[in-house]
Image: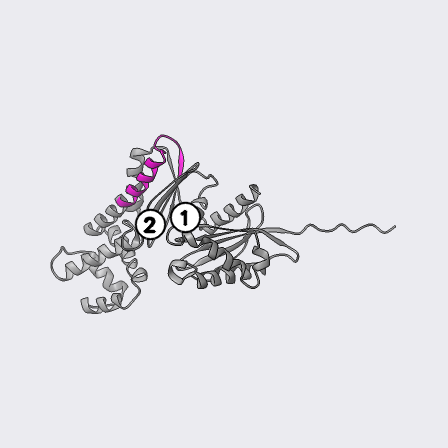
Amino acid sequence: MEKKRRSKKPKLYVIGVDAGGTKTDVALADLRGKILAITRPGSASPRNLGIEESVFNIAKGIKEVLKKTRKGGKIISTFVALPSIEEEYKERKGDILEKLKEQKGISKILKGKILIGSDQIAAFRSGTKGKDGVLLIAGTGCVAHGWKGEKEAKISGWGWLADEGSAFWVGQKVFQTILKNLDKRGSETFLTELAFREFKTKDKIELLKRIYSQNPTEIVPKFSIICDKASKKGDRIAKRIMAEAGKELALAAKKVIQELKFQRIKFPLVLIGSMFKSKIVLNKIKKDIKKIAPKAQFIRPREGPVRGAIRLAIDDLKWK
């Protein structure tokens, strides 16, 4: 008698997407959270590109990772983390979701199995499995965001015209300091020599041409790297600017901590962004925050925010 063949169960997967202004990570993972494939389709920020192009690039990344699934495998949950989705695009979530589901090649896979959320919650969850705590981002821009049960608090994150303590904010201060130095309106500083080296210029006019001919959100933050280098060489002005950045970032985080009443309990404080490479910034933040929240646990994730998006995709399965 011929034995009945057992039908193999399909392999189950989740997808996590971390859409950013400069790059996007799309990852395929199993239900244990092990990342099996990752692709980077380019920028996918609605704020920078608009909804149509943002959705197109996300779909492009998803199509690429789908090639890594086993034949007959199923995607049972997808989490797409988007910048500005809780700000100016909050009322457009439904539009973005529908446009994603309409994309050729992924429409059947995503039907009824996709969540859209903030890149901030994904960034936070990249550093912790817990749902309560505080996130402090300090890269080109900055934001402090916290969650505690049903409560949520957000401070800063209002774009490059504000965002005190961010790389853009530091870069602007450095640029102003250099021009004061060149005009002999300010003190001598090593920042000026470093800027000429970095941008391969010889004088003020060449420097101005180089800076003003480019996208300010891309070129201005580069001065923050110059500032960190100068601070390590002992430049007094550079050290002061970095300390001021740390103070501003700590202030934003402290406001979130106070609003959510984390002062006396243990909680994760996830730190993400290039500004934390500066010891001056990092030490200032830790010192200021420990004064009001001595049990804060500072975490700098080893993996990017796409790890958080994977965790959120898996979490969603637990509630279904």
Q: Please provide the residue range marked out in magenta.
A: 248-268
Can residue 229 be spotted in the picture?
Answer: no
- Residue that label 1 marks: 120
**Residue at 59% in and 56% down:** 109
Say which element carries label 2. loop
**Residue at 46% in and 39% down:** 131
Query: As rendered, which of 297 and 97 lies closer to the eye?
Result: 97
Residue 251 highlighted magenta (yes or no) = yes
Percent position of residue 212, x then y: 25, 66
On residue 157, which mark appears? Answer: 2
Q: Identify the image quadrant of residue 183.
A: bottom left
Percent position of residue 41, x then y: 47, 62
Residue 41 highlighted magenta (yes or no) = no
**How far is disc 2 from disc 1 in space, using C-alphas?**
10 Å
Residue count near mark 2 (Cα–Cα under 10 Å), binned few <14, some 14–19, many ≥20? many
Amino acid type, mark 1: Gln
Colour setting:
one colour
Q: How many marks?
A: 2
Amino acid type, mark 2: Gly
Query: As rendered, which of 289 and 87 lies closer to the eye?
Result: 87
Seen as rendered, the residue at the extreme top is 264
Q: Are marks 2 and 1 in contact (CB under 8 Å)?
A: yes
**Residue at 37% in and 44% down:** 145
First in sequence: mark 2 or mark 1? 1
